[in-house]
Image (cartoon, grey):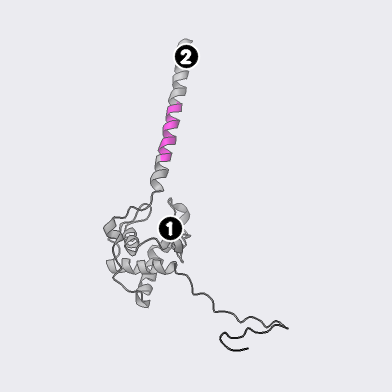
Amino acid sequence: MTGDKNRKHMLRVGVFVVLIGMILLAIALATIHKKTWAVPPEAKALKNPLASSETNITAAKRVYSDQCANCHGDSGKGDGSDAMMYDPAPSDLTDAAKMSKVTDGEIYYQITEGRKPMPSYKKRLTEELRWQLVLLVRSFAEQPAPPPPTKQPDVPGSKPPEPSGQPK
């Protein structure tokens, strides 16, 4: 009977050790997936050699629609039809605060090198197409122009303000 108790105890300890190991592995994998992009300083310093133009944006839209929209969404919000399948989730390219902290070189590096689950486009797209995509990605985060000022309705009994610098 003592041998039976000893075996049961060892089995429990073994199961406990395996469970702890699985938990630690899950934590490690989650940590790896949540890392930020490690972009080399020389890549961050790269400047886009292309100017933003209708031609460049149009070319990038065709590539984006074919290669990127399934994950990043048609407007860059990270809400494409395949987005829910991936961890980490695709970036929201419309987040102006976040995008203002990223250089063109960083965006170009991320497109070029990729990071799981995003593939590398180094061999799939030309340098020019990748730089055109940088221009398009930048356009997603641009703030629209503020609306024109509206004329305030006349309120009965109120006087319009007098122009400054003129006598009353």
Q: Position of residue 43 (x, y in %)?
A: 28, 59
- For label 1, count other residues whose C-alpha is less than 10 Å away and answer few (under 14), some (14-19) or many (20+): some
Going by the image, does 155 lie left or right of 107?
Answer: right
Q: Residue at x 36, y 76 (%)?
A: 53
Residue bearing mark 1 = 91
Looking at this view, name the residue that lies furthest to the right.
Answer: 157
From the image, state whether disc 1 or disc 2 is nearer to you. 1
Q: Amino acid at mark 1?
A: Ser
Residue 1 magenta-drawn?
no
Residue 16 magenta-drawn?
yes
- For label 2, count other residues whose C-alpha is less than 10 Å away and answer few (under 14), some (14-19) or many (20+): few
- Please state the extent of the stretch shown in magenta in the rendering: 15-27
Looking at this view, name the residue that lies furthest to the front.
Answer: 167
Front residue of 30/125: it is 30
Front residue of 126/50: it is 50
Q: What is the CA distance from the residue labelled 1 to the residue labelled 2?
A: 55 Å
Q: Position of residue 84 (x, y in %)?
A: 48, 54
Going by the image, does 161 lie left or right of 103?
Answer: right
Q: Amino acid at mark 2?
A: Asp
Which secondary structure lies at badge 1?
loop
User: Is residue 28 in view?
Assistant: yes
**Residue 22 in which image quadrant:** top left
Q: Residue at x 63, y 83 (%)?
A: 161
> What number is the disc on residue 4?
2
User: Is residue 126 in view?
Assistant: no
Tell me if label 1 and label 2 are in contact, CB under 8 Å.
Answer: no
Which secondary structure lies at badge 2?
helix
Q: Residue at x 56, y 79 (%)?
A: 149
> What number is the disc on residue 7?
none
Looking at the magenta stretch, what is its main secondary structure?
helix
